[in-house]
Image: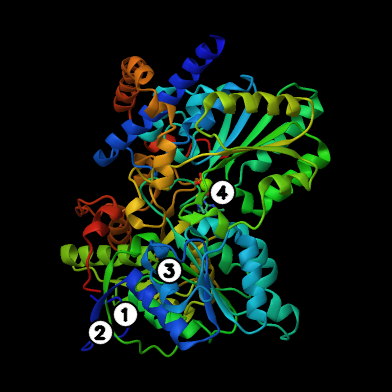
Amino acid sequence: MKDEAIYRRLFRTALLIRLVEERIIELYPSDKIQSPVHLSIGQEAVAVGVCDGLQPDDLVFATYRSHGFYIAKGGSLDAMFAELYGRKGGVSGGKAGSMHLAAPEVGLMGSSAVVASTIPHAVGAALSFKRRGASQIAVAVFGDGATEEGVYHESLNFAALMKVPVLFLCEDNGLAVHSHRPVRQSYRLAEHAASFGIASRRLEEGWDMLAIRQATLEAAARVRAGEPFVLEIVTSRYKEHVGVGEDFHFNYRSSDSVDAWKRRDPLIVDQKLAAALRPDIEREIEAAVAFAEASPAPGHAELLTDVI
Amino acid sequence: MSIAAVKPAQGTRVLSYAGALLETMDAALADHANVFIMGQGVDDFKGIFGSTTGLAEKYGAARVFDVPLMEEGMTGVAIGASLVGDYPITTHIRADFSFLAMNQIINLASKYRYMFGGLMRCPMLIRIVVGRSWGQGAQHSQSPQATFAHYPGLTVIMPSSSQAILDMYPAIINRHPGPVISIEHRLLYNLDFTVAPSEKRVPLTSYVARKGSDVTVVATSVMVLEALRAAQYVEDQTGISAEVIDLNSISHPDWNLVTASVARTGRLVVADTSWLEYGVAAEVCRQLVMRDPGLLRQPPTMLGMAPAPCPTAKSLEDIYYPSQHETVDAILTQVKGDKHGIALPVERSMTEGYKRFRGPF
Ligand SMILES: Cc1ncc(C[n+]2csc(CCOP(=O)(O)OP(=O)(O)O)c2C)c(N)n1
Ligand SMILES: [Mg+2]
């Protein structure tokens, strides 16, 4: 029963993310959103399960694919749509767009479009937490491809040496743009982490929000006690790497694995709950879209502010 | 109006920028067994915006291959292969990602020949693409010609047309003695240009893209097209004749060409794709002033990105980059003063124009 209530809460946030992104897909041809979008459709459970397993003051450092984390961390929907529209009411006044969502007031500490570049930021925040004796933890969110960059290895090494409270969270969708993981990686993340003395876990059931939440709670407890941890969650990107379409017709991947994933995707399987929650969520989204539409565009007065 | 110094006569054809890149990449692989291409996505169906599509199939995975996310490592690998006689071509789909390879490019590649007194050489071609428009934002839009050209040992070019690619790439690949950074522009990729067989004997230099007598416009990359359009508009409206110089070779321009032009016109506009501060615009002025501080009849006009990171919102992006308006206004202001009173073109944003742009140059 308790689980049931948690499931409903997680499900609602995941459905909100999906419907937000489906709304973005609808709006996109109108050219109202003139910003590259990296959709998280298929991967919502990760953001939702992880953020629910964190404390509100734990900090998340994210990537260009962060609509999900922004919403799951509690970022304002109005400010998000206005940001995508490039309006003054946007969370960053239109200067960020989809790729650089941030909401420090709820612990989303920015997202970067340079792969792997925010991983050491999480380590740095964790270093500060440790120095101050704070009970917060920092979470570095990144894709499987990001682990190939040198800075990932440097970050793990430093985090292990300094024993800082950082959770390395890998969203493994098996793809970096159109390249499959086996042609890019000769290592396994767990073994690699172990070579630094960092414990890890790989969760194959990346559609299961409760399992992800539980794994995060357990990992976060260890991290809070002062050891870095690598949590790898297998997931599935339904849409193209960037943009609002599908990409199966390019034949670089088959739709089979995505179809198999969809058969387990609670947002698709649990039609009844989705139908029950949908009207309320849609109202919320329409209000956010209306807010964005009404928000004025930035101009000369804003161009050169916040530079230094 | 021709973008090439040599007027294309017979034997011309229409070729897109991406098409010219693909042709030169193909020819490099066909002509030189030691050439290979590596970069993220070079072998996928998008093929770096169509500039490497099909080459992996044609030449095999040993010659054209995808790499993990490893910008610094890849560049170091390229240096190593080059040191033992291969000619690597590497790609970054955004110039911004080459910043992860700065250590290898600047501390190693640019220095190897000199630092070892000529014992070592690492010729290679690094292709990087500048993004612009559709909310590329702060990290997908940078244009680092000034950064790279600052370092002795690097050769930096900015091809502004298909002809520039056909002229320069075959002369660079396996022939140029050192590392070359070619800064390509995403907005140019889908444009068609009229090209002629290359006749340039010294392609890595600057050239006159349009002859004129009243004002000199020195431009780079996509701003060359912007300057050519503006010059045409101004001539049509007022008869003012603007000379447009494509700097083309950023690290080694033809300063005599620039100086001679300004000596004739006494008026200067610089139109660059990057920031003005410590950039191409500043260097053009330095070169002129060092030769003859009296060359200019009045202060020059400089067009570049606003001094801020690139904003994502369209309304900000539109005023962040110099528009057709500003380019025309700059030329008119140089010749007639800022109260010129001549109507500016309707089009504000260049990108709008480029969607319809098609030759004849
Ligand atoms: C340093 C850097 N290199 C290359 C790119 C181009 N790029 C953007 S996303 C991406 C793939 C990253 O894959 P992954 O980390 O698995 O994240 P995913 O997109 O799958 O969520 C690449 C190569 C980039 N943005 N930054
Ligand atoms: Mg991935």
Label 3 SS: loop
Identify the subunit bearing mark 4.
A
Identify the subunit bearing mark 2.
B
> Label 4 amino acid?
Val
Label 1 SS: loop
Label 2 SS: loop
> Distance between the Cα atoms at labels 4 and 3?
46 Å
Asked if residue B49 is positioned above or below residue B83 in the image, the reply reads above
Please state which of the two labelled residues, at mark 2 or mark 3, is closer to the viewer: 2
Look at mark 2 in the image and give the residue it sits on.
Answer: B8
State which tag comes first along the sequence, 1 or 3. Answer: 1
Q: Work out which quarter of the rendered image holds the C terminus of chain A and state it.
A: top right
Picture quadrant where residue B69 is located = bottom right
Look at mark 3 in the image and give the residue it sits on.
Answer: B296
> Distance between the Cα atoms at labels 1 and 3?
27 Å
Picture quadrant where residue A222 is located = top right
State which tag comes first along the sequence, 2 or 3. Answer: 2
Look at mark 4 in the image and give the residue it sits on.
Answer: A115
Identify the subunit bearing mark 1.
B
State whether label 4 is within 8 Å of ligand 1: yes
> Label 2 amino acid?
Pro
Asked if residue B191 is positioned above or below residue A145 in the image, the reply reads below
Res B4 label: 1
- Same chain for mark 4 and mark 3? The answer is no
State whether label 2 is within 8 Å of ligand 1: no
- Same chain for mark 1 and mark 3? The answer is yes
For label 1, count other residues whose C-alpha is less than 10 Å away and answer few (under 14), some (14-19) or many (20+): many
- Same chain for mark 2 and mark 3? The answer is yes
